[in-house]
Image (cartoon, rainbow, N blue to C red):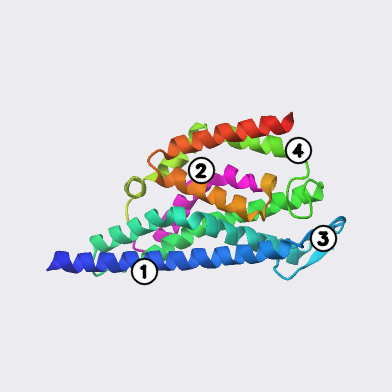
């Protein structure tokens, strides 16, 4: 009887977590697609101007310094985009967290704890988004991005590609990826399920930090192919998903590294 009750609760937890995560991903991608459509001005000559990813057709003279509102819009773009790209690959970890919490105590609150864990995970990517916004500001200040937020320098693109490819073969990549590939192993190595808010957020933040360490250089490729290039955003999200969830994910990462180095060398030449 107890086993049957527990199994029913576990099934319900999985459905709730998966449904909430799916809704968040759909909303994030809808926002990204809205921004991308706004950025595509149908071949309009953008010389001397830059687009602001606000979804309402805002343009500013390229020579004009960034305003606070522009920084806020770009930061929001990066934060929502990172959630849309990374949340699917975090699903196994979130489902495992809810399951462990439920099995540990039927009377506990695993769904609330899972929500706080997810908040910590997202917080890590929000921190990354802030840094990405700063980098974009610096690149635009040096006139290294075109009006649609794509690298305007072949050398910059080549360096980013080669650096991304080399990073895919480093031990740091291996360490971070290993933490992301084994949800139960991650929990066991870091003290197991936490029921308190601070503990949940901290553990989620720690997992998110490993995820950022695993994937940050792939996100930097968006400066080469276009920050608002929806096709490449989807392809990078798929690559991250395969790296983390496929049994041969490590080899996917290394193969992607080889492809990046080859593309970078070709761009240099």
Residue identified by numbered label 2: 214
Left-right relation of 57 to 250: right
Q: Which of marks 2 and 1 is in front?
A: 1
Q: Which of marks 3 and 2 is nearer the N terminus?
A: 3
Label 2 and label 4: CA atoms lie apart by 25 Å
Q: Can residue 72 be seen? A: no
Q: Which of marks 2 and 4 is nearer the N terminus?
A: 4
Start and end of the magenta stretch? 195-222
Residue identified by numbered label 4: 154
Task: Give the class, few, some or many, for how many residues have Cα within 10 Å of label 4's Cα (few <14, many ≥20).
Answer: some
Position above or below: 215 against 68: above
* Image point (43%, 40%), residue name: 249
The secondary structure type at the circle numbered 2 is helix
Q: Which of marks 4 and 3 is in front?
A: 3
Q: Nearer the viewer, mark 2 or mark 4?
A: 4
Label 2 and label 1: CA atoms lie apart by 28 Å
Residue identified by numbered label 3: 44
Q: Between residues 134 and 152, which one lies in front from this camera angle?
A: 152
Q: Is 40 contained in the magenta span?
A: no
Q: Earlier in the sequence, mark 1 or mark 4?
A: 1
Left-right relation of 186 to 162: left
Q: Can residue 77 be seen? A: yes
Left-right relation of 114 to 53: left
The circle drawn on residue 16 is 1
């Amino acid at each position: 009887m107890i086993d049957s009750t527990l199994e029913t609760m576990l099934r319900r937890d999985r459905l709730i977590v998966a449904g909430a995560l799916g809704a968040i991903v759909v909303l994030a991608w809808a926002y990204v697609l809205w921004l991308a459509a706004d950025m595509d001005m149908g071949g309009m000559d953008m010389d001397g101007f830059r687009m602001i990813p606000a979804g309402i057709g805002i343009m500013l003279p390229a020579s004009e310094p960034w305003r606070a509102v522009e920084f806020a819009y770009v930061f929001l773009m990066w934060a929502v985009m990172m959630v849309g790209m990374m949340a699917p690959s975090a699903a196994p970890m979130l489902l495992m967290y809810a399951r462990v919490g439920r099995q540990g105590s039927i009377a506990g609150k695993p769904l609330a704890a899972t929500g706080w864990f997810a908040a910590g995970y997202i917080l890590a990517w929000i921190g990354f988004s802030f840094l990405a916004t700063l980098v974009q500001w610096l690149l635009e200040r040096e006139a290294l991005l075109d009006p649609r937020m794509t690298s305007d320098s072949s050398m910059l693109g080549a360096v980013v590609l080669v650096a991304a490819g080399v990073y895919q073969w480093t031990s740091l990549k291996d360490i971070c990826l290993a933490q992301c590939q084994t949800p139960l192993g991650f929990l066991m190595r870091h003290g197991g399920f936490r029921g308190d808010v601070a503990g949940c957020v901290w553990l989620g933040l720690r997992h998110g930090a490993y995820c950022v360490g695993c994937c940050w250089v792939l996100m930097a490729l968006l400066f080469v192919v276009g920050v608002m290039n929806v096709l490449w955003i989807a392809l990078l999200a798929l690559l991250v998903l395969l790296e983390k969830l496929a049994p041969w994910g490590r080899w996917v990462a290394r193969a992607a590294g080889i492809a990046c180095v080859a593309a970078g060398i070709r761009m240099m030449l």
